[in-house]
Image (cartoon, coloured by chain):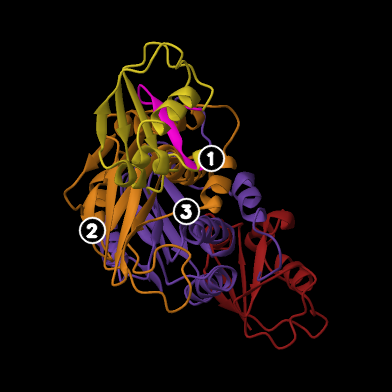
Chain colours: A red, B purple, C orange, D yellow
């Protein structure tokens, strides 16, 4: 599974993209955030306030309860500020 | 039509080309967002913004903008729609975004133009980073943008 | 700024000049009204409009437009306002009117632009006459224009 | 007093401008419309449906009850259709 980070999440994690292979019990976006948090201090810092992290699963906005089933690409980012 | 580009664009040239009348267009509404030298809700005396860098999520950006355009065309009878959004680095005074809508009647043009920019602000994956003399920082999302987008909530299209 | 003129104008050139950023303008909203080939609420099969002639009340027109501009500036914090309205004869596809507003924030630009065109439609002394293959006739006022203007009623400025 | 006519009111009256000297009992816009109506068939036709006639006194919109006192210029026209 490809995980992408944008804006200050990328700054904190230290990379914009990584490929991960989470265990089968990681079923939802929230599970994935918890699992990534456990991987390194940088990840922990990026996800320290999950309430301000937004997510997209296969390029569609997804909330913390959304299932991952078979997703190829999951992205984490702050609330958008374009326009 | 959706364009996401790093190249600067000329508001006048784009609006001029978009507005060429066919006899069936009664009204053209446009909104252009420009880089301001004091972008966020910053205190008086805060350092001016030297430049802005727009990051986005390639692929998802175009997909979301196409959905937003489709939603506007579903809600209003529109002859034409153009959304241009720049990414990369730009300086105060430069355009960031342009939304143009054309319709037989002005209400459809004006409302859909406001709708497009409101939805774009909350649903398209762009992020702004400001350069100031005190350093760079990511612009925080504004609650007022969520409120503006909520005005249009009738049915979803996340 | 108010301009009433017989000469055609170029929407792109006007919007381009108006949008030159100063770093303090965050948003520019514009509305252009164009001559349509079927202007009124006419039945299917009604003859197309060949041309439109705009008559006005010189003196009162400028006065009313200046009042409308002043009212917009009173209601919203605007960096700049431009209203151009043509008079005389024009053909389908040609611009009749252009309203541009610039503000620090997009809400003020978008709302004031809609306000200006809605008030202009009901408070500025212009009258349209259509040329069709069946002859000329004066365009009737539309109740929907009154309704659109009433949205903005808070206090008067006849 | 100068009286101006625009759009189809001008077509019906047959002139865009005339100078008139109404008697002193013509005090309001409504009085002036009635007095003008009595002047010719063309005027009568122009004012045959007063409800769809709009008026300006010295270049300000004025309703049928507005006083004329000393007005230099009164204009009659249909509801506006610009923009």
Q: In x, y percent, where is residue C109?
A: 45, 43
Q: Is residue B118 left or right of residue D68?
A: right
Front disc: 1 or 3: 1
Q: Is residue C17 left or right of residue A63?
A: left
**Pointer 2: what residue?**
C90
Front disc: 2 or 1: 1
Q: Which mark is on residue B128?
A: 3
Q: In x, y percent, where is residue B121?
A: 54, 56
Magenta-highlighted residues: D51-63
Q: In x, y percent, where is residue B26?
A: 39, 62
**Pointer 1: what residue?**
D51
Q: Chain of mark 2?
A: C
Front disc: 2 or 3: 2
Q: Residue at x 38, y 42 (%)?
A: C101
Q: Is residue B2 visible?
A: yes
Q: Residue furthest bottom?
A: A70
The foreground one among B106 and D68 is D68
As helix, strand or loop, the secondary structure at mark 1 comes to: helix
Q: Is residue C23 visible?
A: no
Answer few, some or many: residues within 10 Å of disc 3's Cα (few below 14, many 20 plus, some between 14 and 19).
many
Q: Is residue A47 magenta?
A: no
From mark 2 to mark 1, how far is it between C-alphas? 30 Å
């Amino acid at each position: 599974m490809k995980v992408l980070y944008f804006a200050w999440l990328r700054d904190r994690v230290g990379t914009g993209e990584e490929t991960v292979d989470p265990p089968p019990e990681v079923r939802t976006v929230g599970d994935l955030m918890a699992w990534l948090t456990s991987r390194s201090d940088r990840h922990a810092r990026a996800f320290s306030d999950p309430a301000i992290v937004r997510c997209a699963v296969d390029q569609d906005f997804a909330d913390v309860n959304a299932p991952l089933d078979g997703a190829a690409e999951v992205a984490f980012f702050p609330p958008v500020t374009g326009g | 039509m959706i364009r996401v580009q790093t190249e600067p664009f000329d508001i006048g040239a784009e609006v001029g080309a978009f507005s060429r009348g066919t006899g069936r267009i009664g009204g053209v509404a446009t909104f252009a967002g420009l880089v301001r030298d004091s972008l966020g809700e910053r205190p008086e005396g805060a350092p001016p913004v030297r430049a802005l860098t727009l990051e986005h999520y390639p692929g998802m950006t175009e997909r979301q903008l196409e959905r937003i355009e489709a939603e506007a065309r579903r809600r209003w009878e529109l002859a034409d729609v153009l959304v241009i959004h720049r990414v990369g680095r730009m300086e105060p005074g430069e355009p960031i975004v342009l939304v143009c809508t054309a319709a037989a009647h002005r209400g459809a043009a004006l409302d859909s133009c406001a709708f497009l920019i409101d939805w774009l602000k909350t649903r398209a994956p762009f992020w702004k980073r400001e350069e100031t003399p005190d350093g760079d920082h990511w612009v925080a999302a504004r609650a007022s943008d969520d409120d503006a987008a909520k005005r249009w909530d009738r049915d979803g299209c996340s």
